[in-house]
C-alpha cells in the first residue's frame, strides 16, 4: 500500500515512447493515488480560453498566462483549481496560515500544493494563494492501471516542485522537469520532437 500512496503529489512525465496523443510530452501532477485509482492534471497544456471567460471571480487570482489549462481527457466540462500556498510546506496534519489553520477552501495535496474549492468565495483565499491554475478536465486511471503503465515504461515518476504548478512557460515544462533530474533522465530532455528528422 505504501507504493500506491507514494505517487500523490509527484509528477508523471510522459516518456517519448508513450503513444497516446492526449499525453504526448505531458507532465501530470498526481492529485490522488490509491487502491481505487489515480487522478491528476496535465500541467503543460494551456488553452486560448481566458479564466475570466469561464470562472470570472477567480480570474484575478489566476497566475500568468491567465488561461484555462486542458487538465486531461476526462470530464473536460468540469474545472479543477490547483494552487500553491506559500509557507504551507509542512507535514500532513500540521496547521498553516492565519491562526494556525490551513486556508478555508484549500485542501493540501502535497507540501504547499493543494486543491481549491472553486465554489468558495475567492476572497477567502486571496490573501493566502501564491499562484492558481484552473484546469478543464483531468487525467484518470482505474485501479492498478497507472502502475501497469509505469511498468510498461510509459511514464517517469519524479518529484514535483511548487513552481511546476505555476510555470510561466508551461510549454517547456516537459524538458525543464527532465533537465533537473540527477540521473540519466536529464538526457531525455534533449530527445527530438520528431526522431525521424534526426
Image (cartoon, rainbow, N blue to C red):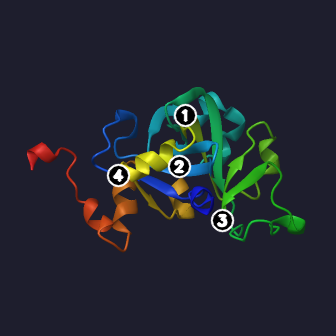
Q: Secondary structure at mark 2?
A: loop
* Residue 168 visible in the shown view: no
> In this figure, which residue is indicated by the disc labeled 2?
64
Residue drawn at (34%, 66%) of the image: 179
Tell me whether circle 4 and circle 3 mark residues in contact (CB < 8 Å): no
Q: Earlier in the sequence, mark 4 or mark 3?
A: 3
> In this figure, which residue is indicated by the disc labeled 1?
50
**Residue 135's spot in the image, x, y percent?**
57, 39
Q: What is the distance, in whole Å, between disc 4 and disc 2 at their CAs?
A: 33 Å
Q: Considering only vertical position in the picture, is 173 above or below 92?
A: above
Q: Quadrant of residue 7?
A: bottom right
Q: Secondary structure at mark 3?
A: loop
> In this figure, which residue is indicated by the disc labeled 3?
111
Q: Residue furthest top?
A: 77
> In this figure, which residue is indicated by the disc labeled 4?
153
Using residue 58 as the reference point, say whether residue 151 is left or right of it: left
Q: Earlier in the sequence, mark 3 or mark 2?
A: 2
Q: Nearer the viewer, mark 4 or mark 3?
A: 4
Q: What is the distance, in whole Å, between disc 3 and disc 1 at their CAs?
A: 28 Å
How many marks overall?
4
Q: Earlier in the sequence, mark 3 or mark 1?
A: 1
Q: Nearer the viewer, mark 4 or mark 2?
A: 4
**How packed is label 1: few (under 14 Cα within 10 Å), some, or many (20 or more)?**
some
Q: What is the distance, in whole Å, between disc 1 and disc 4 at their CAs?
A: 35 Å
Q: Earlier in the sequence, mark 4 or mark 2?
A: 2
Using residue 8 as the reference point, say whether residue 127 is left or right of it: right
**How packed is label 2: few (under 14 Cα within 10 Å), some, or many (20 or more)?**
some
Amino acid at each position: 500500500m505504501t507504493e500506491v500512496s507514494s505517487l500523490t503529489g509527484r509528477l508523471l512525465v510522459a516518456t517519448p515512447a508513450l503513444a497516446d496523443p492526449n499525453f504526448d510530452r505531458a507532465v501530470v501532477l498526481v492529485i490522488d493515488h490509491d487502491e481505487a485509482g489515480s487522478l491528476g492534471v496535465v500541467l503543460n497544456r494551456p488553452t486560448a480560453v481566458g479564466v475570466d471567460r469561464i470562472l470570472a471571480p477567480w480570474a484575478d487570482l489566476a497566475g500568468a498566462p491567465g488561461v484555462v489549462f486542458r487538465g486531461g481527457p476526462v470530464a473536460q466540462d468540469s474545472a479543477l483549481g490547483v494552487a500553491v500556498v506559500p509557507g504551507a510546506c509542512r507535514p500532513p496534519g500540521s496547521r498553516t496560515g492565519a491562526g494556525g489553520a490551513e486556508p478555508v477552501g484549500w485542501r493540501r495535496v502535497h507540501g504547499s500544493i493543494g486543491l481549491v474549492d472553486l465554489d468558495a468565495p475567492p476572497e477567502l483565499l486571496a490573501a493566502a494563494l501564491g499562484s492558481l491554475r484552473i484546469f478543464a478536465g483531468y487525467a484518470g486511471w482505474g485501479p492498478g492501471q497507472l502502475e501497469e503503465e509505469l511498468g510498461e515504461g510509459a511514464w517517469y515518476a519524479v518529484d514535483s516542485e511548487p513552481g511546476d504548478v505555476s510555470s510561466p512557460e508551461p510549454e517547456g515544462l516537459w524538458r525543464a522537469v527532465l533537465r533537473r533530474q540527477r540521473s540519466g533522465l536529464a538526457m531525455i530532455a534533449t530527445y527530438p520532437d520528431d526522431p525521424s528528422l534526426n
